[in-house]
Amino acid sequence: MTPGTEYQLPDTIADRYLDDAVSLTRRLIRNACVNTGDPASGNEIVSVMTIQEYLGDTGTVVEPLPGRASVVYRMRGTEPTAPRLLLIPHLDVVPAETASWSRDPFAGDIVDGFIWGRGAVDMLNLTASMVAVFKSLLDGSTPAPRGDVILAAVADEEAGGIYGAQHLVEHHWDLVACDMVLTEVAGPSLTGPGGTALPVTVAEKGSAWRKVHAHGTSGHGSQPYARDNAVVNLARAFADIATTPQPLLITPEWSRFVQYLPVDEAILDDLRDPERIDQAIEQIAETDVTLARWVHACTHLTLSPTVIQGGGKANVVPSSADGEIDIRILPGQDANDLSDHLRKVLGPDRYDEIDFEVIFDIPANVSPPEGPLWDAIQAAAEIHTGLSTLAPTLTPVMTDARFFRALGIPAYGVGLFDDSVTFGEMLAMFHGADERVSVESVRRTTAFLATVIERLSEPR
C-alpha cells in the first residue's frame, strides 16, 4: 500500500477478534507482570488466567516456579504431516519508572487512538493479536489450518527466558514441537532508498553479559595516597570500556537490510563502508539520535557497563568491587573477539588483574529469509499493503527466537502497523517511557497474522 492511501482491512478474520485484541492488550498491560530479573518477580500466572478465560480453555500450564507460568495450546491441523507453526509471545514486561511517564504505565488507557502502557509495543500488542487469532481458529471462524498451530504464551522473556521458553524447549518439547515460529520483534514499514518494505526480524545479536570483579587493598579512607582502591580500579576500567570505540562489523544481514533504512540516499554507501559508517551514524544522530543508536548497535560489538557496587563504609577503602556489563555480539563475532577487544582496551596487565565472569554466552542467531513461512508473510504483506517487499532485519536485542533457531527452526518477528509513529519513535519506546501502540496497529496486526496462517495453509 502506498503511504498515505486509505487502508481497508482485508476480510480475513471477523471484526470481533480485532476488537478482542485491543481489549486483551489493555488487560495484559493492567496485569502488570513486571519482571525485574528476580526469580520471584513476573507473576505471569495472572496473564495466563486472562488468556484461559478469553479462550475458554485451560490449556497446559507449565509453572517451574510459583507464579512463573506459561500456557500452551495446540490446534491440530487437517494434515498431520503439514508443517507446524508456533506462535510464542511473552507475558512479562520490564519495570516502568512512573515519574518518567505522562500517564499511568499500567492503566492501559486509550488516549487519542493509542493504547498506553508498559508492554504496549514489547510485546503485549503481539501477544494479544496472536491470542485473538488463535481464538478465531478455535471457534472455527477462520478456516482450519493444514498444519498444527501452537500458541505458547510464555513467562520470563525479559530476563532470558529461563523460566519460560527455555524451560519449555528443554523440559516440555512435546508441547511446543514445531517447524516454524512467529514471535517478536515487529515494527512499522520502512521507506528508504531501496523503496518501501515491511521489516521482518530474522536475526538477533548474541548476549555475552559479564560480571566484573576488581580487587584492591583495604585501608583507612582518611589516607587515600597510593591506595589500591578496588572501586577506583573498577570505575577506571568501566570508563575505558564505555568510551573506547567499539569493534565494527558489516554483516551480510546489515548489508541486505540497509537499503530500506529511512535515511538520505547520499549516506547509503557510507553505511556499508567500515571506514565511513561511524561518520554516517553521527550524521543520522543530528536529526534522530534513537535511529543512530540502533544503527550503531546493529553494526558494532557493544559494551555497556550498567551495574557497579563496592565498599561498605565511607571511611574504609574497599578491597573489592563488582559490576556488570551488557555485551552484545554480532553474527560472525564470538567470545574471542570480545576478549581481544577487552585486552586492547585495558592493556594486558589490567585485563589480567580483573576477573570477568560469564552471565550469558549466547551466540548471535539468524534464520534465512526463505521457506514456507517467509513466503506466507510475503503473500500476506501484498494482500494487506499492496507491497511484497520484505526487509530482513537484525535486532540488537535478545528474544525467545534463539531457542528455536538453535535447533534449526526458522523464527521470524513481524506485525503490521499504521504510520502513526516512525521506526525511530517506536525504537525509543522499547523499555522507555510513554510506551504506546495505536489501536489501528493492533487491529491491523491481528488481521495480518490471520492472513499469514491462511496463506501458510494453502496447498503447495
Image (tube, rainbow, N blue to C red):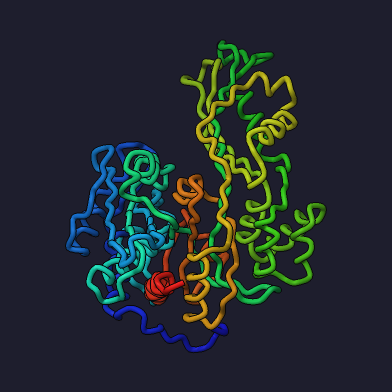
Give left or right: position of 78 versus 49: right
Q: Which of 249 and 4 is in front in this view?
A: 249
Q: In which quarter of the image is residue 87?
A: bottom left
Q: Which residue is drawn at 77% across and 66% down?
A: 267
Q: Which of 319 and 256 is in front in this view?
A: 256
Q: In which quarter of the image is residue 457?
A: bottom left
Q: How many marks?
A: 0
Give left or right: position of 8 versus 52: right
Question: Above or below — where is 55 with respect to 197?
Answer: above
Position in image of residue 175 (x %, y %):
31, 49
Position in image of residue 403 (x %, y %):
46, 46
Position in image of residue 312 (x %, y %):
46, 20
Extreme right residue here? 275
- Residue 150 in view of the camera: yes
Q: If the image is split into quadrants, where does the N terminus sit?
A: bottom right
Q: Which residue is drawn at 52% across and 15% down?
A: 316
Q: Which of 220 and 374 is in front in this view?
A: 374
Question: Above or below — where is 160 with respect to 394?
Answer: above
Question: Above or below — where is 58 with respect to 383?
Answer: above
Q: Residue at x 72, y 43 (%)?
A: 247
